[in-house]
Image (cartoon, grey):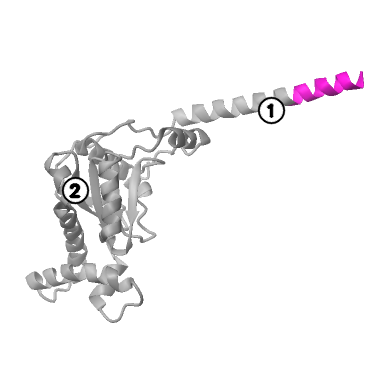
Amino acid sequence: MKNANFLITLGLIFLAMACNQTAKESTEANAASNLYQRPEKVESAENAFQLLVEGNQRFVSNLTLPDDVSNLKRKSLKENGQKPFAAILTCSDSRVPPELLFDQGLGDLFVIRVAGNVIDSVGMGSIQYAVEHLGIPLVIVLGHEKCGAVHATIEGGEFPGSVSSIARRIEPSIANVKSIYGETNFLEELVIKANIDENVNVLSHDELMKHSMASGTVKAIGALYHLESGTVEFFDAKPVHHSE
């Protein structure tokens, strides 16, 4: 009799555990259905751009949508692979997190971060991988106001270790701005924008990227993040319809 009672108790415990697991998965599935969901596959730069614009509008308006970070979402990304719709090359500055300021979630953006948002061979390889293997249609070079890397390079002086490699990639933009505007009071702001344009230019002259851009499978544009307002200002971008 004792053995029978033990087996019954054990069976009830396992049944309760199974019911709890089922209830948990059901709750997660219901919660996920109310979260931000983007199209499974975004194939055009225009549609990718629209998603970024709409996401930034939500961020600026404090109307960001809750993201699905459940184990079901993580499991899906593990089993089905990633399908990000945009690659973002941006600064390592802690105030500029692309997933937040574009209101995107797990698996949505392919992000490359380096101080000064400059492109080296490793960064270029990452972008090429995103375009060639992941089929990403849009690449954004995202700079920001008050960029410490730009400010330090303008100030000059000795740079320790490999920091000098970042400065060397920003220096041409400083020279270009000075050749046009001289010693202007707005030098830093102008160099930040010129540095964005310079790295978009570097992308457009890369052989692999040049081929993809010429065929229309990918577009590369620059953008500037305004720290206080939260607004992303896009450069050389076609006007798009803003969602209500």
Mark on residue 238? none
Quadrant where the C terminus is found in the figure: top left
Q: Position of residue 60 (x, y in %)?
A: 32, 47
Question: Disc 1 marks which residue?
Answer: 17
Crowdedness near tag 1: few (<14), some (14–19) or many (≥20) residues, C-alpha within 10 Å:
few
Q: What secondary structure is found at the residue carrying circle 1? A: helix
The reply to whether callout 2 and callout 1 are in contact (CB within 8 Å) is: no
Amino acid found under the numbered disc labelled 1: Met
Q: Position of residue 215 (x, y in %)?
A: 13, 39
> At x 88% / y 21%, what residue is drawn?
3
Question: How many numbered circles does the render carry?
Answer: 2
Q: Residue 11 in magenta?
A: yes
Instruction: Give the number of the mark in front: 2 or 1.
Output: 2
Name the foreground residue: 83 vs 109.
83
Amino acid found under the numbered disc labelled 2: Leu
Q: CA distance from mark 2 to mark 1?
A: 53 Å
Mark on residue 208? 2
Res 184 → quadrant: bottom left
Above or below for 209 versus 77 = below
> Which contiguous range is marked in magenta?
1-13
Per the picture, the main secondary structure of the magenta-coloured stretch is helix
Above or below for 9 versus 209 = above
